[in-house]
Image: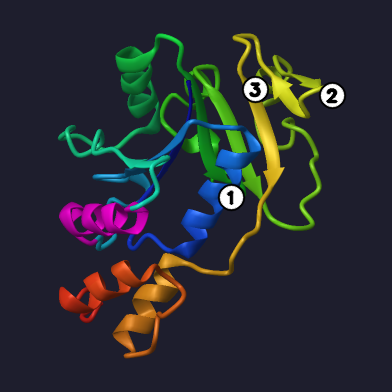
């Protein structure tokens, strides 16, 4: 089994998230992609974030009808901040037998990964898929990670990825980035502008029905 893990605030989930997940799923022949909303993202601890319940419901409605997209509330179960290393550790311990994990994240997030909790342990726990923007030039790991850590990885030309000492791989892959952001969607709603075709229709109706983002 090969699972992709796609985490984030998802405030709200939008078509860009869904399209990237679909392309990575196809690219790596994954069996499923888990959408994992952060309960208390440490990098946004002082920001106003929509309740977990609403973000959860929007994800569930967005992926409804797609049997290979699933939702996980693993980060809601923890009372502390949402740390990716703990989420991956939990999933591996619960489903480790015959499970290969691909942690999916954007280029900007990967460039800041050294600020994450136990980032060095996290990078050795599973495969990573870094979604890159058009025109991105792969300059390797050394400009991003400390040289002594990056030196543990060797580029494997057969799979076009950097294989680490645990056998897991860091891949850089271009995807179709739709120029959509959750913050822009929230601002559009606040200003009374249309968000049609930026989010699935079910999500748009949910936002309108529950008057989300009106007072931001």
In the image, the segment drawn in magenta is 50-64
Decide which of tag 1 and tag 3 comes sooner along the chain. Answer: 1
User: Residue 164, which numbered label?
Assistant: none
Q: Is residue 98 above or below residue 194?
A: above
| Residue 26 part of the magenta-drawn span | no
Question: Looking at the figure, which quarter contains the C terminus?
Answer: bottom left
Mark 2: few, some, or many residues within 10 Å (few <14, many ≥20)? few
Which element type, helix, strand or loop, lies under badge 2?
loop
Residue 157 - label: 2
In the image, is 94 to the left or to the right of 103?
Answer: left
Residue 72: x and y in percent read 28, 38
Residue nearest the viewer, comparing 93 with 206: 206
Q: Quadrant of residue 202?
A: bottom left
Residue at x 80%, y 39% (from the top left corner): 139
| SS type, badge 3 | strand
User: Residue 58 colored magenta?
Assistant: yes
Location of mark 1 (residue): 108
Residue 86: which quarter of the image? top left
Q: Residues within 10 Å of mark 3 (few under 14, many from 20)?
A: many
The residue that label 3 is drawn on is 169
Marks 2 and 3 in Cβ contact (< 8 Å): no
Residue 132, given in percent of the width and then of the height, sits at 67, 49
Residue 209 picture location, percent across and down:
17, 76
Dot 1 alpha-carbon crowd within 10 angstroms: few under 14, some 14 to 19, many 20 or more: few
| Label 2 to label 3: alpha-carbon separation | 12 Å
């Amino acid at each position: 089994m090969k699972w992709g893990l796609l985490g984030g605030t998802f405030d709200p989930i939008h078509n860009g998230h869904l399209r990237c997940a679909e392309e990575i799923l196809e690219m790596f022949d994954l069996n499923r992609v888990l959408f994992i909303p952060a309960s208390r993202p440490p990098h946004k601890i002082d920001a106003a974030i929509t309740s977990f319940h609403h973000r959860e419901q929007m994800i569930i409605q967005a992926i409804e009808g797609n049997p290979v997209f699933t939702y996980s509330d693993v980060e809601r179960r923890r009372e502390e901040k949402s740390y990716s290393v703990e989420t991956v550790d939990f999933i591996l311990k619960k489903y480790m037998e015959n499970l290969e994990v691909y942690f999916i994240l954007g280029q900007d997030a990967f460039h800041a990964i050294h600020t994450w909790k136990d980032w060095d342990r996290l990078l050795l726990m599973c495969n990573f898929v870094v979604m890159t923007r058009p025109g991105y030039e792969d300059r390797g790991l050394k400009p991003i990670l400390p040289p002594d850590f990056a030196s543990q990885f060797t580029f494997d030309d057969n799979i076009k990825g950097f294989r680490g000492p645990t056998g897991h791989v860091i891949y850089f892959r271009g995807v179709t980035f739709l120029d959509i952001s959750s913050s822009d969607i929230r601002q559009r709603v606040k200003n009374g502008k249309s968000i049609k075709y930026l989010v699935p229709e079910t999500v748009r109706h949910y936002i309108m029905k529950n008057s989300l983002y009106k007072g931001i």
